[in-house]
Amino acid sequence: MARRKRPDSGVSGSVIVDKPAGMTSHDVVARARRAFGTRKVGHAGTLDPDATGVLVLGVGRGTKLLTFISGLDKRYVGEVVFGTETSTLDAAGEVTATHDMTGLADDAVQAALPALTGPIEQIPPMVSAIKIDGKRLHELAREGKEVERPPRPVTIHEFAAAPTSDPLVWSIEVHCSSGTYIRTLAADLGHHLGGGAHLRALRRTSVGPWGLDGATPLDDDGSLDPAALGDLATLVTHLPSTTIGPHDALAVSHGKRLTGLPAAPHLAVFDDAGSLLAIYESDGRTARPVVVVRAA
């Protein structure tokens, strides 16, 4: 007998989650689907299972807005462990090489940071979700395969490091562009210092304007409180916005072009009641809809 589908609640909104360690980003999405009674849940920017911190979710119509979030800058804190390289470039992998980096001086670490700051290129780790010839790298890695990966340009806006009580461990803070691999940054720092290193205790502290202070942790049983659902407007706080009257709001609901809107690559359009209607692309004369959130 065919399995009956559960009715969709039809709710829409946003959730900023403080993801715990030991859970994938997809696991968090699954918790959100149960909490809000809908399969229409997505996230902007994957966090590794061992990493914690800010994960932005869109629910219902909010999933349409995630594309405007995934490219935003991010901030992280973590620890670099010098002297040990691993197969995954973080603490979850097997040790592949060791180096004697005792006596590593803070001056040497600070001197190495500028070479890894600004526009740089990174070779994605084999455990990433990037596809090569139609297959994700982490799938190939599980098969014991390693393939050549072309370097990718990223921007490191800030890269700070400070010694800890352990002479081989430095705490780091990173402000970077989307697509940056912090584990690769840690490994590259070890290579710049003549040895090797891996990353541990990674925590994402912000995605664009959303930080840990506004993030909701999961409950003790791993569930997500339905009260954590925020409105759709939360997902576009980083975009310029404009408010339109009822006549134009009707046109927007039908996906029509508008005139006279402010110029912006992506402009959040609200009605006079404060509800988000759509994202438009405007040159200051004519504006066309990119995403209509509330259709007729």
Image (cartoon, grey):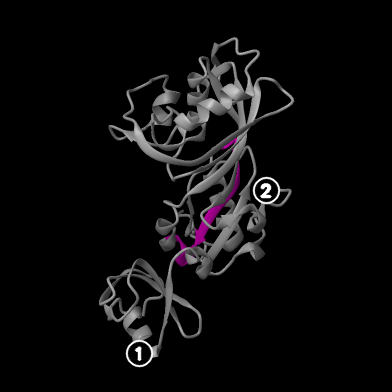
Residue 233: assigned label: none
53 falls in the magenta region: yes
Q: Position of residue 59 (x, y in %)?
A: 51, 62
List the residue tagged with mark 1.
247
Q: Nearer the viewer, residue 238 or 127?
A: 238
List the residue tagged with mark 2.
222
* Three-letter residue code for mark 1: His
Q: In terms of secondary structure, where does tag 1 sit?
A: helix
Position of residue 245 in the picture relative to residue 82 (left or right)? left
Residue at left 63%, top 50%? 18
Quarter in which the C terminus is drawn: bottom left
- Above or below residue 206? Residue 52 is above
Whole-number angstrom distance, CA of label 1 to CA of label 2: 46 Å
Mark 2 is surrounded, within 10 Å at the Cα level, by few (under 14), some (14 to 19) or many (20 or more) other residues, namely few
Do we see residue 90 in this rendering? Answer: no
- Check contact, mark 1 vs mark 2: CB within 8 A: no
Count of numbered badges drawn on the protein: 2
Camera-side mark, 1 or 2:
1
Q: Position of residue 106 (x, y in %)?
A: 63, 24
Say which label, 1 or 2, has the lower sequence index. 2
Position of residue 129 in the picture relative to residue 258 (left or right)? right
Q: Nearer the viewer, residue 41 or 232?
A: 232
Give the residues drawn in magenta, as a range. Answer: 49-63
Do we see residue 80 in this rendering? Answer: yes
Q: Position of residue 254 (x, y in %)?
A: 31, 79
* Three-letter residue code for mark 2: Gly
